Image (spheres, helix red, strand yellow):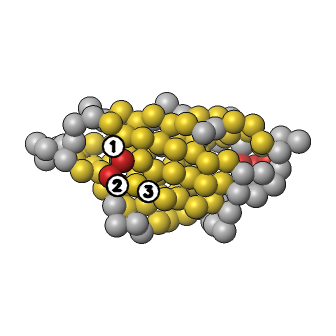
Amino acid sequence: QVQLVESGGGSVQPGGSLRLSCAASGVFFRINTMGWYRQAPGNQRELVGSTTSTGSATYADSVKGRFTISRDNAKNTVYLQMNSLQHEDTAVYLCNAQGRYFNGISFDSWGQGTQVTVSS
């Protein structure tokens, strides 16, 4: 089973920055895609950004130019650098990893989430 542990959330003023980290552990063959989602109260979960094992990244339009996703494959860790944070970015941020076990079975795992609050 793949475990994802997030860190780096917190409270920040508008215009501030935060960096989230998510480390994957367990026994698996490979992780293909790692990404970040977020969910605000009353809203559906939405993709913030994701990256493949080769570094190809995708972002939600709402965060393009402000957030940067990166990945350290050797550490099975994905990062989300969030700059110019806005009130609308307030949400629980959840890490996601998709890959395969050695037996060929795929997995789609989620972290517990970390709260990001943007408030003046």
Instruction: Tell me the element at label 2.
Output: helix
Point out the tag, 3 or 1, that comes first from the N-terminus: 3
Residue 108 image label: 1
Which circle, 2 or 1, is nearer the viewer? 2
Query: Mark 2 near mark 1, Cβ–Cβ under 8 Å?
Result: no
Identify the amino acid type marked 2.
Answer: Asn
Q: Can you identify the residue that label 2 sits on?
A: 73
The location of residue 107, given as percent across then percent down, is 27, 42
Query: Mark 3 near mark 2, Cβ–Cβ under 8 Å?
Result: yes
Q: Can you identify the residue that label 3 sits on?
A: 71
Identify the amino acid type marked 3.
Answer: Arg
Identify the amino acid type marked 1.
Answer: Asp
Which circle, 3 or 1, is nearer the viewer? 3
Crowd band around label 2 with a 10 angstrom C-alpha radius: few (<14), some (14–19), many (20+)? some
Residue at (51%, 51%) from the top-left corner?
79
Query: Mark 3 near mark 1, Cβ–Cβ under 8 Å?
Result: no
Q: Write down the quadrant of residue 39 in the picture.
A: top right
Instruction: Tell me the element at label 3.
Output: strand
Q: Write down the quadrant of residue 93 in the picture.
A: top right
* Spatial separation of the CA atoms under disc 3 and disc 1: 17 Å
* Spatial separation of the CA atoms under disc 2 and disc 1: 17 Å
Residue at (59%, 35%) from the top-left corner?
114
Instruction: Tell me the element at label 1.
Output: strand
Residue at (49%, 65%) from the top-left corner?
58
